[in-house]
Image: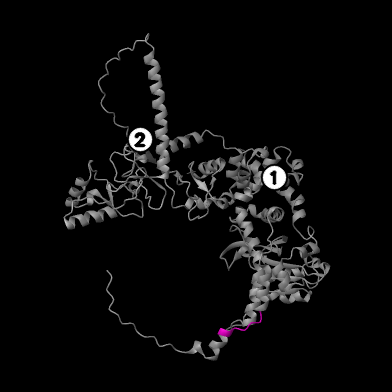
């Protein structure tokens, strides 16, 4: 490509951030001066960097014919700047200097090598020395044998005319300035072949991990994205499930070398089937990439349910099918092709596994029956306990502190008028349903209710749960604390009538602002209520199925899938721990709760917000920019 051509004067590789000029666009007198500086024939497609172009212009203006370089500290091998990098000086007359002089068709002005090119050149010199030594020893042994006569070689045949390369296909044509050793594939892309940074754009973390081979194969077969051998990835992106962000990288290219094309062709012959029946032999990162669980967690989940009685054959693969569906959100057709089974067989097995998890796994990790009131109290963290609880009471008398909130699951537009009317949200302007979560202070999910229609508010959902005959609010005790947001303001009276304590951000009156005390109380609620928002984000972060729009056929088991995901989060996800400075945060919040707003009082006392400010016009003779 043009951006990777070297400057014919100083030898620096011209990249996007470096100005460049094509030789065909230079003035004739500048071309003559450039030909005096260089000893090789110039091509009209060659380039000159911006610094060398300025030097040429300066020499023509001063009638100077002495050669000047725009960049001095340039690697002779790769053309990169070594001003701030590790570099090695080329010693004249050394074997290293003789070798690197063969790398280019002309001698560059640089006399440095970067560390990578220096190591490559040293390896080549060592290899040649070993080869020459072996060749010399073989020649000595051959000459010491006097009985062997050296035959006279036959005369060489006349040289053949040079053969022209075969023409390329129309869709594989070379771009301007593109080398013959690389070719552009319109339907495939590849990442940058570098180990200096993570393959994700904008990642500043240390990239010390190779991309696993199975993940490379998945990206190549499903997304036509090739990850080179030298590409590196950081710890966070390796274990995250955000590979779709890789497809929008600005550093992706469609040019491939001959070696990379050979790897693409050889990878077609590799079997791309992962054996979940022998999951003990599968690496942890591969199992986590597909299912969201490590191998030990997968085995623990498989052994905790009687799945073999439901799916006698290949029960681990059947469990993996449903987990892959949750994790990736891919279509049934794509997952069935991955396991090489029919789509109907995949759906049948996933229904069996879903029912098994709903009957035997979810009741153990979700619902009011899986956790006692005392266990909820034990999950109170320091900040909400000291701000809204009674930490100095006996453990049996302490209040349980919970947080409630609703989330959204997008559904497909339905031809059923009643269903369409109930699921259309005038707030989000699309169809959705609302699951409702009750969460402990450390992020443990007590229960999930729903799905509710898109039209009722959070307060209406809470009033429905209070008035229903369910066991949730019969489960809590008097003086238990509910931390809510402003959307629950219409249900506060019903909760307080049952003897519960409710804390939510204060609501301002129309045309008024919050007082200092009301604002400080709202900040105390915000210090604690972020936990339920984090839990809501875990569903769509760890399980891409809930990011997608549920089709009408899948909406029938949508809530079952959501409850299974909630049980998986409770079972395997880490809980939120107390910060190290939790006591300091509580001390600052309580000490400043009744602190007056001195700045606001000062502004109101002197009526600073009601005064008019007389601005002075600036008069200056500024130059006009063109």
Q: Is residue 393 left or right of residue 528?
A: right
Count up the numbered dots.
2
- Give the secondary structure at mark 2: helix
The magenta stretch is 593-599
Q: Identify the residue position indicated by label 1 in the image.
A: 296
Q: Give percent across and percent down for residue 287.
A: 63, 44
Mark 1 burial class by Cα count in 10 Å: few <14, some 14-19, many 20+: few
Residue 623: image quadrant is bottom left
- Give the secondary structure at mark 1: helix
The residue drawn where x is 27% and y is 16% is 155
In the image shown, does 314 or 14 lie closer to the viewer? 14
Compared to 555, does 608 lie above or below? below
Please, which residue is most extreme toward the bottom here?
606
Q: Is residue 143 part of the magenta span, yes or no? A: no
Kindly tell me whether residue 97 is visible in this rendering.
Answer: yes
Compared to 620, does 211 lie above or below? above
Q: Give percent across and percent down for residue 159.
A: 26, 23
In the image shown, does 542 or 78 lie closer to the viewer? 78
In the image shown, does 405 or 571 lie closer to the viewer? 571
Q: Is residue 82 left or right of residue 226?
A: left
Say whether marks 2 and 1 touch (CB < 8 Å).
Answer: no
Report the magenta stretch's main SS: loop
Q: How is the image coloured?
A: one colour
Q: Give percent across and percent down for residue 304.
A: 76, 47
Q: Is residue 104 left or right of residue 321?
A: left
Give the CA separation, mark 2 to mark 1: 56 Å
In the image shown, does 471 or 107 lie closer to the viewer? 107
The residue drawn where x is 66% and y is 75% is 589
Q: Is residue 598 part of the magenta span, yes or no? A: yes
Numbered tag placed on residue 95 in the rendering? 2
């Amino acid at each position: 490509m043009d951006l990777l051509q070297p400057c014919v004067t100083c030898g620096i590789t011209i990249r996007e951030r470096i100005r460049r000029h094509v030789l065909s666009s230079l003035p004739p007198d500048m071309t003559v001066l450039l030909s005096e500086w260089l000893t090789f024939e110039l091509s009209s497609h060659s380039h000159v960097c911006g610094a060398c172009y300025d030097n040429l212009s300066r020499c023509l203006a001063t009638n100077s014919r002495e050669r000047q370089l725009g960049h001095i500290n340039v690697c002779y091998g790769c053309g990169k700047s070594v001003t701030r990098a590790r570099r090695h000086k080329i010693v004249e007359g050394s074997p290293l200097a003789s070798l690197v002089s063969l790398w280019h068709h002309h001698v560059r002005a640089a006399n440095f090598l970067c560390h990578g090119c220096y190591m490559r050149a040293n390896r080549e010199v060592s290899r040649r020395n070993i080869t020459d030594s072996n060749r010399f020893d073989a020649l000595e042994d051959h000459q010491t044998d006097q009985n062997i006569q050296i035959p006279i070689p036959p005369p060489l045949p006349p040289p053949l005319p040079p053969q022209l390369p075969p023409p390329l296909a129309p869709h594989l044509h070379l771009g301007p300035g593109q080398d013959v050793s690389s070719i552009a594939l319109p339907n495939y892309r590849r990442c940058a072949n570098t180990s200096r940074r993570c393959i994700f754009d904008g990642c500043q973390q240390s990239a010390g991990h190779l991309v696993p081979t199975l993940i490379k194969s998945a990206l190549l077969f499903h997304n036509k994205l090739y990850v080179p051998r030298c590409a590196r990835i950081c710890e966070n992106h390796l274990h995250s499930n955000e590979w779709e962000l890789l497809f929008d990288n600005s550093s992706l290219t469609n040019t491939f070398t001959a070696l990379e094309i050979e790897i693409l062709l050889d990878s077609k012959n590799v079997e791309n089937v992962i054996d979940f029946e022998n999951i003990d032999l599968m690496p942890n990162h591969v199992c986590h990439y597909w299912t969201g669980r490590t191998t030990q967690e997968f085995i623990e989940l498989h052994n905790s349910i009687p799945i073999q009685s439901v799916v006698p054959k290949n029960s681990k693969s059947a469990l993996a099918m449903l987990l892959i569906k949750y994790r990736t959100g891919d279509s049934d057709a794509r997952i069935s092709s991955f396991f090489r089974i029919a789509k109907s067989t995949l759906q049948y097995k996933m229904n069996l596994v879903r029912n098994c998890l709903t009957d035997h796994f979810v009741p153990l990790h979700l619902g009011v029956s899986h956790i006692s009131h005392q266990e909820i109290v034990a999950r109170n963290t320091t900040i909400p306990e000291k701000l809204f609880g009674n930490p100095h009471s006996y453990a049996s008398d302490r209040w349980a502190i919970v947080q409630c909130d609703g989330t959204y699951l997008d559904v497909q537009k339905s031809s059923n008028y009643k269903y369409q009317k109930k699921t259309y949200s005038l707030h989000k302007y699309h169809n959705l349903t609302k699951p409702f979560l009750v969460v402990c202070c450390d992020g443990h999910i007590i229960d999930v209710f729903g799905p509710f229609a898109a039209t009722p508010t959070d307060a209406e959902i809470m009033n429905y749960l209070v008035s229903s005959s369910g066991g949730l609010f019969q489960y809590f005790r008097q003086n238990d604390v509910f931390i809510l947001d402003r959307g629950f303001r219409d249900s506060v009276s019903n909760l307080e009538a049952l003897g519960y304590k409710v804390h939510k951000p204060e609501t301002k009156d129309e045309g008024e602002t919050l007082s200092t005390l009301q604002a400080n109380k709202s900040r105390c609620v915000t210090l604690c209520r972020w936990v339920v928002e984090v839990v809501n984000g875990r569903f769509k972060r760890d399980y891409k199925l809930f990011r997608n729009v549920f089709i009408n056929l899948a909406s029938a088991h949508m809530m079952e899938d959501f409850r299974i995901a909630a049980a998986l989060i409770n079972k395997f996800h880490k809980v939120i721990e107390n910060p190290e400075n939790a006591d300091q945060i509580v001390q600052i919040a309580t000490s400043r709760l009744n602190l007056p707003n001195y700045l606001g009082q000062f502004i109101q006392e002197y009526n600073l917000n009601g005064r008019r400010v007389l601005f002075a016009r600036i008069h200056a003779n500024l130059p006009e920019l063109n």
